[in-house]
Amino acid sequence: MQDAKARSNQERTQATRTALLAAARQLFVQKGYAGTSTPEIVAAAGITRGALYHHFADKQALFRALLDDEARAVAAEIEHAAPIDLPVRDALVAGSLAYLAAMTVPGRTQLLLVDGPAVLGPSAMFALDAEHAGRTLREGLQAALGHNLPHDATSDATVDALAALLSAAFDRAALEVAAGADAEAFRTAMIGLVESTVPTASAP
């Protein structure tokens, strides 16, 4: 009986959090972070302000949690497209294309690449990316290039720098596509960029 009650409480808690994040996402995409108030969020979610502050310290904490969910979803798409048994060069190409596709989810580019840096700052967004899509890219580059580099701090810095440069290029591609650019042209360019970065010999 106690276990059933605990499960029921956990389900209610999760349902409230989910409703808050869904309502906040819709409003942030429609009106922007600055143009969205917490009363609007709780009204759209159908809960009280007290419930909001039970889950999140403030609007920024709610926004950060939303961005974390979005970034985690992008990383999941990349990992699904690039399983561990795929040759590393092919995996990098597949993961790069999966990133671009994942960023076409309505509102995601605005949240992660426009509003996120403006609200949380570049450093916080770099850290968020490093936990998710950036992590998958760095792991792929390390697998592809690691055996061609000495295992020391210099090689780690080289991989980090390549990951940062490619990540910036991929983010720009996502922004261009969101603005109406030719998605196929950017997919082709991304493939060429990855293939020029990772030699064919790196593939097993």
Image (cartoon, grey):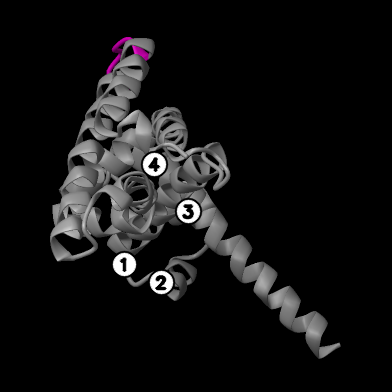
Residue at numbered disc 4: 27
Which element type, helix, strand or loop, lies under badge 2? helix
Q: Position of residue 94 (x, y in %)?
A: 46, 31
Q: Are marks 1 and 2 in contact (CB under 8 Å)?
A: yes
Measure how far apart labels 3 and 1 are at the Cα level: 13 Å
Sequence order check: which comes first, mark 2 or mark 3?
3
Q: Are marks 4 and 2 in contact (CB under 8 Å)?
A: no
Residue type at the position of mark 3? Leu
Residue at numbered disc 1: 58
Badge 2: residue crowd in 10 Å (few <14, some 14–19, many ≥20) = some
Badge 4: residue crowd in 10 Å (few <14, some 14–19, many ≥20) = some
Measure how far apart labels 4 and 1 are at the Cα level: 16 Å
Q: Position of residue 19 (x, y in %)?
A: 55, 54
Instruction: Specify start and end residues of the magenta stretch as a single range.
Output: 178-183
Residue type at the position of mark 1? Asp
Sequence order check: which comes first, mark 3 or mark 1?
3
Q: Quadrant of residue 28?
A: top left
Residue type at the position of mark 2? Tyr
Camera-nearest residue between 32 and 192: 192
Residue at numbered disc 3: 21
